[in-house]
Image: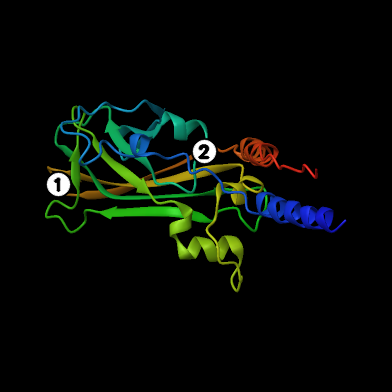
Amino acid sequence: MKKKIMMILCIVALVLPVSGCYLEASEVTLENETVGTIGRDGTIEIEEKEMMNLETHHKIKFGQTSLSFKPVYAVEKERAENWLFTQTSSIDLSLHIDDVQEGMEVMVTQVYGDISLLSKYAKYNGIRQDSINIAYGSLPTGGVSIRESDGYSMPFQIEGVDKSETFFHLFMGYGSSQAKRITEYDLAGVVQGAVLNVVWTILIREEASGNLYIKTINDRVGIPYDRGTELQENEETSINTEHLDTDTE
């Protein structure tokens, strides 16, 4: 009898950590997160990652003039199909123009972007993951010129949410006694996607008159997120694959 009791206690001790301390896979390796490894690789031929693009069209009018702009947002295919909040990601932001009339200079003077949670719950909706704000107003020209053959482009490097103390407090609640990193499993039950919000500030100069005009372009781009089922299956698998020896002979 005593032997059976001891065996039951051992089984309980083994089962509790498995069911309560599921470790979520990060899905990152040296191979998929870096271009090469020092000490292992010598020369690396960089291959462009497969990207998924979204292009929007905007027409800006002022006076008798009309300008056509094409912002393009490019996300790595794997991230574009199912966003990953807890790992570093990159979105390429670029702006192109169809035609610049003679006697006119068009410049990007500021780029603001942020990415945030999309949730059906007001408590979580709009919590910002990361943001970027690049201003060129201090340049002698007041901005960076763009034309038909030469657009503007820059990468938006986005940090994982668990690197932001502000995100932690907003998501977990101020005053929370939790002392753990936020995981995709925490987010999966309340988040339906990510929203990329970008504001382009355009400076237009008429060379003949010297007049300056400021115009803005704003895009809100959705990125799908559906990791709930996948993470639940992984957790169930990790529990079911534990084999306990209950032989009492």
The image shows residue 184, relative to residue 42, as above or below, that is: below
Badge 1: few (under 14), some or many (20 or more) residues near its Cα, within 10 Å? Answer: few
Q: Residue at x 75, y 54 (%)?
A: 12
- Relative to 165, does residue 44 appear above or below in the rendering? above
**First along the sequence among labels 1 and 2:** 1
Residue at x 39% of width, y 32% of height:
76
Q: Hey, what amino acid is under mark 1?
A: Ser
Q: Amino acid at mark 2?
A: Gly
The residue tagged 2 is 222
Foreground pick, 90 / 217: 90
Q: In the current view of this chain or complex, which residue is farthest to the bottom?
A: 175
Location of residue 141 in the rendering, given as x and y in whole percent from the top left corner: 13, 51
Residue at 34 percent across and 39 percent down: it is 30
Q: SS class of the residue under badge 2?
A: strand
- Give whichever of 111, 240 is nearer the camera: 240
Q: Quadrant of residue 122?
A: bottom right
Quadrant where the N terminus lies? bottom right
Q: Residue at x 80, y 53 (%)?
A: 8
Residue corresponding to mark 1: 209
Q: Where 200 falls versus 138 (above or below)?
A: above
Q: CA separation, marks 1 and 2?
A: 41 Å
Note whether residue 61 is visible. Answer: no
Q: Picture coordinates of residue 50 (x, y %)? A: 36, 25
Q: Nearer the viewer, residue 95 or 204?
A: 95
Where residue 238 sits in the image (x, y, percent)? 64, 40
Q: Is residue 110 left or right of residue 21?
A: left
